[in-house]
Amino acid sequence: MAELTGLADDRALLGRTSTAERVSDILRSRIAEGFFPPGTRLSEDSIGGALGVSRNTLREAFRLLTHERLLVHELNRGVFVRVLTVEDVEDIYRTRSLVECAVVRGLGEPPYAVEALAKAVADGQRSARESDWKGVSTANIHFHRELVALAGSERTDELMRSVFAELRLAFHVVDDPRRLHEPYLARNRQILQTLQSGDRDGAERLLAGYLDDSLRGLVEVYGRRVADAGQGIGFGIG
């Protein structure tokens, strides 16, 4: 499997305790990065061999990721990377709006520690100059992950880690990633600048509008891809 390229290198991340949790961390990252696109069947033998873990450990990792809605088990067929429905995408954005806007609303008094947000904005702009739209997508996710981290809550971070990983499943089937991601480079920068100025309420308004527009744009293109797949055209990985 071409998707296994480099997976063996991740064996070092397991250390001496090859736990299912650490295996699931590796697979979650690989899924989020698009190495295992939506609809891909995950081979126990190939992945277990690449990581050097037992079948039982791998199955437990699969179970954990199924609980996170990243994988799905199909009876007599195996384990697959989940293909989201349009309703899934809408629910992801409802969660994002509830959590991200609440984080900004609860920031307290400025100044705010936005250095990580600034780095994500710079990374996105650099990727755009290089026409690396997958990199732009990654930087965008990092921006919103760091925005959530401003709450200083490990539980919120953990919740949104799974939400953002699930969101990437939708991004990976979009056929024109530039059209999807490029408009939000400037909007991320605007949110950053508003927070840097200490305007928490203004940043929340910008973020709420951003998420509404992002949902509409993603549902439009994702819904078309899902419909095409239903007609046997198949997904194109962006």
Image: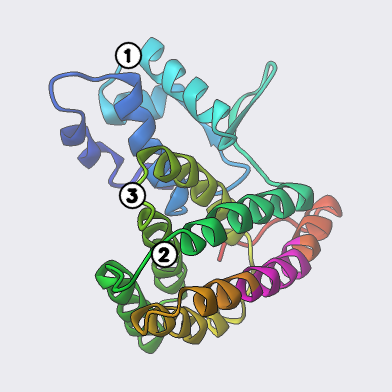
Query: Which numbered circle lies on residue 62?
Result: none
Question: Badge 3 is on which residue?
Answer: 152
The front one of 147 and 59 is: 147
| Chosen colour scheme | rainbow
Residue 140 percent coordinates (x, y): 45, 69
Q: Residue at x 28, y 46 (%)?
A: 6
99 versus 12 height, above or below: below
Question: Badge 1 is on which residue?
Answer: 54
The disc labelled 1 sits on which kind of residue? Answer: Ser
Q: Residue at x 31, y 80 (%)?
A: 122
Residue 186 percent coordinates (x, y): 48, 87
- Residue segment shown in magenta: 209-222
Q: Residue at x 46, y 79 (%)?
A: 191
Q: Residue at x 30, y 41 (%)?
A: 7
The front one of 41 and 56 is: 56
Q: Tell which circle, 1 or 3, labels the residue nearer the N-terminal end.
A: 1
The residue mark sitting in front, 2 or 1, is 2
Q: Tell which circle, 3 or 2, labels the residue nearer the N-terminal end.
A: 2
